[in-house]
Image (spheres, grey):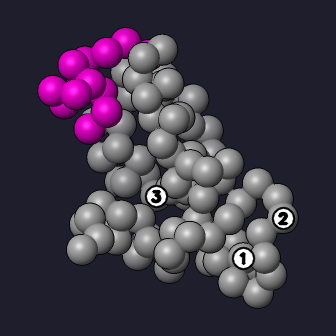
Amino acid sequence: MRPLWLQEIQDSYIVDTQATKLLSELSISSPSGLYSLKDGIIHYKERIWVGHQRVLQSKILSSLHASAIGGHSGYEVTYKRVKHLFAWFKLKQSVQEFVA
């Protein structure tokens, strides 16, 4: 069974124009660049591509910063934790704003 958060990310691609474009390109040709498609999820350098969905980005940041796992870590620790698993435009800036 697929985790709900992963399904949320996949569903968000429908309303994200760049993600839709990437999905089209990746489904037609085999990945040769930084992006790849695995089980309907876009990956950027092997990390899960979240795209421009601020709500999902916020959920991820909250989970990895303020949860028992994150323990209200500072910027550096939170950024490394998020960057290890996920990717989106201006990720570094998003983490800085969230932690501040």
- Which residue in the protein does label 2 denote? 32
Residue 51 in picture, x, y percent from top left = 55, 58
Looking at the rendered structure, the kind of residue marked 1 is: Leu
Which is closer to the viewer, label 1 or label 2? Answer: 2
- Does 68 lie within the magenta span? yes
Q: Residue at x 45, y 34 (%)?
A: 82
- Which residue in the protein does label 1 denote? 26
Point out which mark residue 53 bears: 3
Which is closer to the viewer, label 1 or label 3? Answer: 1
Which element carries disc 1, helix, strand or loop? Answer: helix
22 in relation to 91, above or below: below
Range of magenta residues: 63-75
- Can you say which quadrant of the picture contains the C terminus? top left
Circle nearer the N terminus (1, 3): 1
For the stretch drawn in magenta, the main secondary structure is loop
- Can you say which quadrant of the picture contains the N terminus? bottom left
Mark 1 and mark 3: span between their CA atoms?
Answer: 20 Å
Which element carries disc 2, helix, strand or loop? Answer: loop
Determine whether label 1 and label 2 are within 8 Å by CB.
no
Mark 2 and mark 3: span between their CA atoms?
Answer: 25 Å
Residue 16 in picture, x, y percent from top left = 55, 70
Residue 23 in picture, x, y percent from top left = 65, 77
Looking at the rendered structure, the kind of residue marked 2 is: Ser
Mark 1 and mark 2: span between their CA atoms?
Answer: 9 Å
